[in-house]
Amino acid sequence: MRHTFLKSLALVVLVIAVTSCSKGDDPAPDDNNNNNNGTSADQTIQVVQTGSWRITSFIDSGQNETADFTGYTFSFNTNGTLVATNGSETIMGTWNVTDGSANSSNDDDGNSTDDDNFNIFFSVPDTSKFDDLIDDWDFISVTNTKIELIDISGGNGGTDYLTFEKL
């Protein structure tokens, strides 16, 4: 009799577990695919601070300008400094990740559910190729080895894409 009771109890627990996980409870996928895979701002900061990165894609309003950054290595330091080096050339900047969930006014990509921003700043002339990287980028995706970003320009309406990959 005890064996029958345990089987019945296990069946009840299984039925409750299955029925409580309905498909309707799942969050809707992001139609724009502009998210950071559920990664919090703090987790993203941890990812970017580990190792050196390179730009593997930079599309500026439809123009592929990736070659402008060939040979540069980017280090996102814990103190908020950003260092881009290419041989003997060093470009200094700053970076941070801001959690935009409290302020939806920064919602550049139209994704109101998660608007963390990856902010990049270099103190360079407007004519510098690094000037194109200065922005508050929105996340497309973040993994331990790749960060994909997007920015929809307010002025000219162009869309820029930036991808960093870990070396």
Image (cartoon, rainbow, N blue to C red):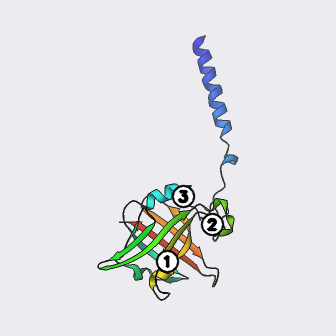
Asked which quadrant contains residue 110, the reply is bottom right
- Residue 32 is marked as 2
The quarter of the picture where the N terminus appears is top right
Q: Nearer the viewer, mark 3 or mark 2?
A: 3
Which numbered disc, 1 or 2, marks the residue that appears first in the sequence? 2
The quarter of the displayed image where residue 72 is located: bottom left
Marks 1, 2: nearer the viewer: 1
In the rendered view, does 159 fall on the left or right side of 103?
A: left
Residue at horizontal 54 percent and vertical 82 percent from the top: 62
Cα distance in 3D space between marks 1 and 2: 22 Å
Which amino acid, mark 3?
Ala
Residue at position x 63%, y 34% in the image: 17
Q: Nearer the viewer, residue 79 or 127?
A: 79
Q: Position of residue 20 (x, y in %)?
A: 67, 37
Residue 109, percent from left and from top = 63, 70
Amino acid at circle 2: Asn
When the figure is inspected, residue 80 is found, relative to residue 126, above or below; the finding is: above
Q: Which residue is mark 3?
A: 41
Earlier residue among tags 1 and 3: 3
Q: Quadrant of the C terminus?
A: bottom left
Q: Which residue appears at 47% of the width and 80% of the height?
A: 123
Front-lying residue, 154 or 27: 154
The image shows residue 76 at horizontal and vertical percentages of 42, 66
Cα distance between the residues tagged 3 and 2: 19 Å
User: In terms of secondary structure, where does tag 3 sit?
Assistant: helix
Q: Is residue 7 left or right of residue 54?
A: right
Numbered mark located on residue 133 in the image? 1
Query: Is 65 situated left or right of 159 in this image?
Result: left
